[in-house]
Image (tube, grey):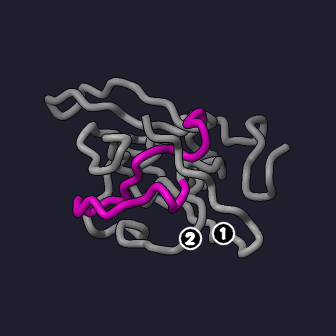
Amino acid sequence: MPTQDETPAADLPKTEEEWRKKLTPEQYHVVREKGTERAFTGKYWDHREDGVYRCVGCGEPLFDSTSKFDSECGWPSFDRPIGDGKEVKEEVDNSLYMTRTEVLCKKCNAHLGHVFDDGPTATGLRYCINSASIDFQKRKPTEPKPEAPKQP
């Protein structure tokens, strides 16, 4: 059952006009047109509160603050998606004359950013995510923090 912050899949916008009404122009550009916000300008690149980052398109929980780290790249960086990672999907991106791995919300197909294999933590990954693609929900004092994944 979805939380009050999640949009049931059946209620998601179905046309680009509906998406434009739901999102700000910057959010629309990033999540629907696969844009990238300028480094060091997004709301969450230096954000340090405890909680969950959700998809701006559908409210799906995507990343937890416990997996966020400072990569000095100017975008929010995480070493893993929330839970078992099933909330995001990855696709090959050959735009801009290079090959990268694009990260999308599995539920609403919103472009979130890219993942790179140069992360400094045990996962070796750096999910470089646009602030315009996510919203933050502060963790309540009664909510437990997720357990870190077991190291190999």
Identify residue type, mark 1: Arg
> Tag 2's secondary structure?
loop
Badge 1 density bin: few <14, some 14–19, many ≥20, Cα 10 Å = some
Residue 99 x %, y %: 21, 27
Q: Residue at x 51, y 57 (%)?
A: 134
The residue lying furthest to the left in this view is 97
* Start-end of magenta stretch: 64-86
Majority secondary structure in the magenta region? loop
Q: Is 121 situated left or right of 135 in this image?
A: left
Residue identifier under label 2: 50
The answer to whether residue 127 is visible is yes
Q: Residues within 10 Å of mark 2 (few under 14, many from 20)?
A: some
Residue 43: image tag: none
Mark 1 → mark 2, Cα distance in angstroms: 6 Å
Residue 129 in the image: state x and y as whole percent.
39, 51
Q: Quadrant of residue 116?
A: top left
Instruction: Name the element at disc 1.
Output: loop
Q: Position of residue 90 (x, y in %)?
A: 43, 29
Number of the label disc, if any, that sits on residue 139: 1
Q: Are marks 1 and 2 in contact (CB under 8 Å)?
A: yes
Numbered disc total:
2
Q: Earlier in the sequence, mark 1 or mark 2?
A: 2
Whether residue 121 is situated above or below residue 9 in the rendered picture:
below
